[in-house]
């Protein structure tokens, strides 16, 4: 079957760094997306990895290891507005996104 | 670019009535549109995938006669919840993808529609 495993909830301090891990199993693989979702809102695109390695984009970086079925999202210089759910979504062989429940990130002052 | 709109953003209706939700890609042609449903604190659940000009493909367990999807043009898809019941109350989100134009095959999401059935 296809599944995603992410921590349910994480807490971090404003200004700090946090890493959200994701392991996945899919039927085929066409890259992996990270989305941010604030409560009551739709997801917004953060990053995409299709090759192994680190992709850096401002305060956010995303890493992928295809052989391990593993990805992480790294958030630096955390701000209060970063409090949200972070969704790891790999794309399977049919170009369908596979969704988990996401990781709720709580930022404390 | 890559903006997707949804209308209405919020709707309250009586049990037994039908509700139509529109999803539009504003600045690109969406070859494929997706309809999701999300219950509180749960993951996005794909309901159906629609390609312009063809019938939607529904996920297992989703009643196609209850959730009518029309994708008549490259910029518009509609979801009609027929004979809505309180258990249909949820957050409905559409997304659109342009395989020809996008760099990553990413899906661009609409802002969602909060449906409450009384």
Image (cartoon, rainbow, N blue to C red):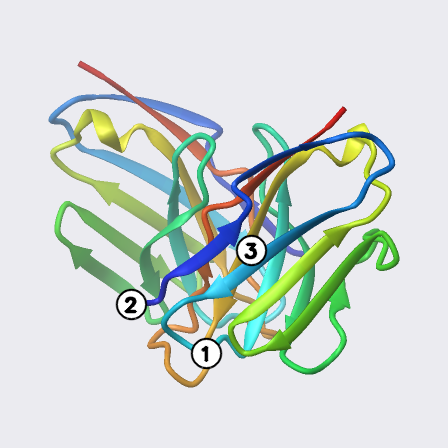
Q: Quadrant of residue B25?
A: bottom left
Task: State left or right for residue A34 relative to residue A54.
Answer: right
For this orientation, the residue located farthest to the top is A109
Q: Earlier in the sequence, mark 2 or mark 3?
A: 2
Q: Is B104 drawn above or below residue B13 in the view shown? A: below
Task: State left or right for residue A63 relative to residue A87.
Answer: left
Q: Quadrant of residue B70?
A: bottom right
Query: SS for tag 2?
Result: loop
User: Do callouts 2 and 3 point to residues on the same chain?
Assistant: yes
Labelled pair 1, 2 in contact (Cβ < 8 Å)? no
* Residue on which disc 2 sits: B1
Q: Is residue A54 visible?
A: yes
Depth order, front residue of A93/B48: B48
Q: Residue at x 52, y 45 (%)?
A: B112
Labelled pair 2, 3 in contact (Cβ < 8 Å)? no
Quadrant in the picture for the N terminus of chain A: bottom right
Q: Quadrant of residue B86?
A: top right
Q: Earlier in the sequence, mark 1 or mark 2?
A: 2
């Amino acid at each position: 079957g296809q599944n995603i495993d992410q921590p349910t909830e994480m807490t971090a301090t404003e200004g700090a760094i946090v890493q959200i891990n994701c392991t996945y199993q899919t039927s085929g693989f066409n890259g992996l997306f990270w989305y941010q979702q604030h409560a009551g809102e739709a997801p917004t695109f953060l990053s995409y990895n299709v090759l192994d390695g680190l992709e850096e984009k401002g305060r956010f970086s995303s890493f992928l290891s295809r052989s391990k079925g593993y990805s992480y999202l790294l958030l630096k210089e955390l701000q209060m507005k970063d409090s949200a759910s972070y969704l790891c979504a790999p794309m399977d062989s049919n170009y369908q996104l596979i969704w988990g429940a996401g990781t709720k990130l709580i930022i404390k002052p | 670019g890559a903006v997707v709109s949804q209308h209405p953003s919020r709707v309250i209706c009586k049990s037994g009535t039908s509700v139509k939700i529109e999803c539009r890609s504003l600045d690109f042609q969406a070859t494929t549109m997706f309809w999701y449903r999300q219950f509180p604190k749960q993951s996005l659940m794909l309901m159906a995938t629609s390609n312009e000009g063809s019938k939607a493909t529904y996920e297992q367990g989703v009643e196609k006669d209850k959730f009518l999807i029309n994708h008549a043009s490259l910029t518009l898809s509609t979801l009609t919840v027929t004979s809505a019941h309180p258990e249909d109350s949820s957050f409905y989100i559409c997304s659109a993808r342009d395989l020809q134009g996008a760099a990553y095959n990413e899906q661009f999401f609409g802002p969602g529609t909060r449906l409450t059935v009384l």
